[in-house]
């Protein structure tokens, strides 16, 4: 688990589960390959945003 | 002469020992001088080199060649390109070319409730547009600015990463990873409420301050999470506001969420390195409470007392006064290094770092000679 | 009439509500300029209490900042009724954060305490060049110059500023105090300042000693 995101509760940070719920078509595709990629850019954005105020 | 790979292995082992509370083969050393110093040491223009990074490889080569260190000496860097593209008001270049933080307010007092309800939403919607002019405006303009800035920063970091990899390969430095986060109270103070703003809030609305610290804690934990907790490295947490608070405000507003932050990170299997800035001597009993082998780099205070009270449980670092390098003779500088070595090295758990980063170079001053003498002295005399 | 002793104590206690209520009520009575001056004086005495508590480690920097804010709020309230009297100043100080440094929290704390103690304070802001210090000294002929810096890179510009004052033939006409995180006795000597401090309250006492 990455610390904390479960409690972030933000419209601008979407967990994979939330993302998948919004894009059910991905269920049928290569889920294992897509998940880390989508998650990676979510996290890169998070770090970028936070570094602007650190 | 050992090859660089063997040196990296040896140094990694030194830090693994240090971090796990074993006595390493000698006191590990980190050069406190930064990229700004290195650029000036190479005789180049500070502002220009921070824009045109292609000059930096030669800069680091000379810097690494001439000053002993066990870790890559490129810490705490603020690259101007993405700040410029975003129209930053909170990190700006001063006339000397040094990237600085003027006092700004990102979050207004009347916005506490909004922040507490969802700190990350509030950051994106309210705080960033206030601090960065290009993030304020039409969605298309904001999207463009953000895309350019992300790309600029990622290019710059990749470039700096290549230089670091080259220097590690050439000079055999320890290869450590780092994450950066802050104590919730400091996060709230630094860029959001400002030094002045938070000082008023502590008296006017302490309940909201406490609630905001709780609300932002998950973000601070996430920000401080290493890519992989088993990697050699630590989460770096610079500590800012505690020395400026009364004891009771520290106890109720600062400490609780900060302690949770450190405990959670350590619970995830990570190391934590605190930069204990200014003077924390009245809070030593609190620091003792933190999980075993927390790394604590001190700015001011009584090194003896710290060794006595914390040195068996935690890893101590810092204290070496950078201003002495500016004003002292070589002998005085080396004597000071010896004094600290004698106090802090016995029993291990000591990492040589200075009390501050060295952020500039006066070419006519004695810092270059003094710094080199001190680094060499600790290297040669720090064996266990 | 407002109870000046109670007001002084409220300022010392940093009791914002009490202070503002008292001062607003006072202003509503349409007082004379002289009475308003007494109220200012009472607040200044309250600030002296704050300074003492700071030196005793009961208050910390955050409290000094808050005190400065309270005082400027109070003066703003009193301004309309104060205008008729000319105030007697105990001395004048030119302050600024030196070239290359943009930090002004410490400088502002000292500035507001000096003002509260009755000094005329000319604040040149941040990133102030040696030339700008020299110009201002020529213009207002202060007794004291206060230079501030948070970063170690402020030491050299402080040195350069003293040098520039020397070259302009002004060094002997002023006392110079330096403040901020990186200053200490050795730096003070090298820079050629008359005094140094990392404590605004102590710095104020030094300045008061100079204008006695
Ligand atoms: C808070 C803080 C920050 C905050 C600033 C928040 C803000 N709103 O300003 C943030 C997080 C943004 C920050 C960022 C950085 N910081 Co910083 N920061 C600090 C910290 C902890 C406190 C500074 C401060 O504001 N103190 C409060 C003021 C009120 O204290 P003061 O200036 O000393 O003033 C008192 C007295 O000295 C006196 N006084 C002051 N001036 C005068 C003048 C006169 C005439 C008189 C009589 C008295 C007087 O009165 C005051 C009250 O008593 C210091 C640590 C420290 N020991 O100071 C590091 C410190 C200044 N930071 C440092 C660094 C390196 C940085 C960064 C470069 C880090 C980075 N890589 O990004 C950045 C950006 C550079 C910058 N600072 O602009 C270093 C500087 C190293 C150096 N060689 O100088 C320090 C010393 C930490 C360290 N130990 O390494 N920082």
Image: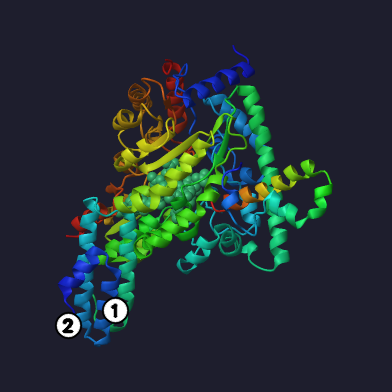
Q: Is residue B203 above or below residue B264?
A: below
Please give the residue where the numbered disc 2 appears in the rendered image: C1
Position of residue B134 measured from the top left corner of the image (x, y, whole percent): 64, 62
Q: Of marks 1 and 2, which one's residue comes earlier in the chain?
A: 2
User: Within 10 angstroms of label 1, few (less than 14), some, or many (20 or more) residues?
Assistant: many
Could you tell me which residue is drawn at 19 percent across and 67 percent down?
C9
Label 2: chain letter = C
Can you say whether B100 is above or below B298 in the image?
below
**Residue C49, position as x, y percentages in the image:** 20, 61
Q: How many marks?
A: 2
- Image quadrant assignment for residue C182: top left
Q: Which residue is mark 1?
A: C78
x and y, in percent, of residue B109 in the image: 45, 66
Which residue does the image show at 59% across and 38% down from the upper left? Answer: B226
Q: Which chain does tag 1 point to?
A: C
Beta carbon of the mark 1 residue lies under 8 A of ligand 1: no
Both labels 1 and 2 in a single chain: yes
């Amino acid at each position: 688990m990455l610390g904390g995101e479960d409690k972030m509760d933000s419209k601008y940070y979407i967990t994979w589960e939330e993302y998948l719920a919004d894009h059910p078509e991905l269920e049928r595709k290569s889920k294992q390959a897509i998940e880390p990629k989508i998650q990676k850019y979510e996290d890169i954005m998070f770090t970028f945003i936070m570094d602007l105020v650190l | 002469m050992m090859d660089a790979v063997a040196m990296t292995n040896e140094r990694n082992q030194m830090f693994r020992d240090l971090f796990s509370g074993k006595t390493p083969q000698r006191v590990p050393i980190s050069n406190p001088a930064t990229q700004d110093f290195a650029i000036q040491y190479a005789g180049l223009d500070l502002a220009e080199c921070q824009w045109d990074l292609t000059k930096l490889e030669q800069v680091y080569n000379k810097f690494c060649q001439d000053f002993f260190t066990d870790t890559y000496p490129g810490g705490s860097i603020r690259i101007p390109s993405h700040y410029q593209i975003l129209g930053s008001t909170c990190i700006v270049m001063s006339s000397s070319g040094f990237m600085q933080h003027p006092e700004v307010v990102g979050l207004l007092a009347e916005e506490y409730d909004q922040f507490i309800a969802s700190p990350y939403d509030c950051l994106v919607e309210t705080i960033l547009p206030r601090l960065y002019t290009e993030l304020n405006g039409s969605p298309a303009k904001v999207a463009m600015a953000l895309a350019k800035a992300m790309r600029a920063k990622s290019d710059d970091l990749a470039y700096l990463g290549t230089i670091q990899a080259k220097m590690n390969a050439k000079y055999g430095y320890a290869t450590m990873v780092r994450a950066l986060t802050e104590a919730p109270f400091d996060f709230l103070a630094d860029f959001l409420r400002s030094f002045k703003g938070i000082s008023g809030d502590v008296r006017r609305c302490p309940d909201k301050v406490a609630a905001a610290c709780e609300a932002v804690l998950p973000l601070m934990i996430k920000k401080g999470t290493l890519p992989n907790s088993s990697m050699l490295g630590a989460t770096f947490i610079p500590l800012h506001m505690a020395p400026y608070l009364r004891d009771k405000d520290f106890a109720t507003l600062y400490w609780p969420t900060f302690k949770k932050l450190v405990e959670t990170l350590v619970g995830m299997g990570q190391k934590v390195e605190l930069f204990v800035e200014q003077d924390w001597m009245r809070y030593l009993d609190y620091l003792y409470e933190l999980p075993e082998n927390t790394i604590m780099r001190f700015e001011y205070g009584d090194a003896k007392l710290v060794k006595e009270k914390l040195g068996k449980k935690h890893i101590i670092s810092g204290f070496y006064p950078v201003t002495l390098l500016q004003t002292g003779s070589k002998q005085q500088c080396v004597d000071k290094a010896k004094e600290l070595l004698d106090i802090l090295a016995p029993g291990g758990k000591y990492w040589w770092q200075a009390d501050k980063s060295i952020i500039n170079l006066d070419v006519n001053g004695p810092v270059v000679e003094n710094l080199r003498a001190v680094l060499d002295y600790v290297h040669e005399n720090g064996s266990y | 009439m407002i109870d000046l002793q109670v007001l002084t104590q409220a300022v010392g206690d940093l009791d914002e509500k009490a202070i503002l209520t008292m001062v607003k009520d006072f202003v509503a009575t349409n007082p004379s300029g002289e009475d308003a001056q007494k109220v200012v004086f009472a607040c200044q005495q309250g600030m002296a209490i704050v300074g003492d508590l700071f030196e005793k480690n009961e208050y910390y920097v955050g409290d000094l900042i808050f005190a400065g804010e309270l005082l400027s709020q109070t003066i703003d309230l009193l301004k309309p009724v104060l205008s008729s009297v000319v105030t007697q100043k105990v001395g004048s100080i030119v302050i600024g954060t030196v070239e290359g440094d943009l930090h002004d929290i410490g400088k502002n704390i000292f500035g507001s305490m000096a003002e509260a103690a009755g000094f005329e304070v000319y604040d040149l802001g941040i990133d102030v060049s040696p030339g700008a210090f020299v110009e201002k000294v020529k213009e207002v002929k202060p007794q004291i110059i206060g230079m501030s810096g948070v970063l170690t890179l402020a030491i050299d510009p402080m040195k350069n500023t003293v040098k520039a004052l020397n070259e302009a033939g002004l060094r002997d006409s002023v006392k110079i105090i330096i403040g901020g995180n990186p200053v200490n006795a050795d730096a003070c000597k090298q820079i050629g300042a008359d005094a140094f401090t990392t404590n605004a309250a102590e710095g104020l006492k030094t300045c008061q000693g100079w204008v006695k």
